[in-house]
Amino acid sequence: MSSKSALNVDGVGENLWRVIQQQNPMTHIFSWLALTVEQLQAVPGISAARGQHLWHQFDLVRKRPFIRWVLAMGIPVPQGALAQLESENWHLLAAKSEAQWRTLPGVGEIRARQLVAFLHHPDVVALAQWLSGQRIPGF
């Protein structure tokens, strides 16, 4: 993930992510959301009980606040502006102009341009659409 602590998946560290990725190649940073209990249990070193637990943890992560998902995507938003984005959703973020971004704390001309470019990048747009299909709040 872009920001490892953004979603804070309980019990999943870097080594486990690596093992899961080797067994189930991922097309993007959130592909793990689509893994089934059976796929997790088939990963070498993961028992049936552990696979069930991991799937449950992945399911719980789905309910994380929208802003944590956006942070995990790697949005270049300054810390000072985060509080003002708590009640936003993807469509509101993507609709913001550079001028609107500049009204937020810590966002100047360059950062506003970066934010607009990030939110309209085809890969990011596709990822947001995929998250919407996964019923992630705010997408």
Image (cartoon, rainbow, N blue to C red):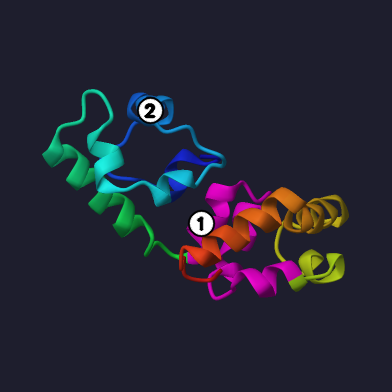
**Mark whose residue sits in front, 1 or 2:** 2
Please give left or right for residue 99 compared with residue 53 in the image: right
Circle 2 is placed at which residue position? 23
Kindly report the distance in space between the C-alpha atoms of the residues bearing marks 1 and 2: 24 Å
Whether 117 is drawn above or below 18: the answer is: below
Q: Which residues are magenta?
A: 66-94
Q: Residue at x 52, y 41 (%)?
A: 3
Residue 91, image x, y percentages = 67, 73
Residue 6, image x, y percentages = 46, 48
User: In the picture, which quadrant includes the C terminus?
Assistant: bottom right
Q: Work out whether residue 10 or residue 125 is closer to the camera in this orientation and state it.
A: 125
Residue 83, image x, y percentages = 55, 66
Task: State yes or no: residue 91 in magenta.
Answer: yes
Please give left or right for residue 2 compared with residue 54 in the image: right
Residue 69 badge = 1
Please tell me how crowded label 1 is: few (under 14), some (14-19), or many (20+) other residues with Cα within 10 Å.
many
* Magenta highlight: main SS: helix
Q: Residue at x 68, y 49 (%)?
A: 76
Residue 24 badge = none
Dot 2 falls on a residue whose secondary structure is helix
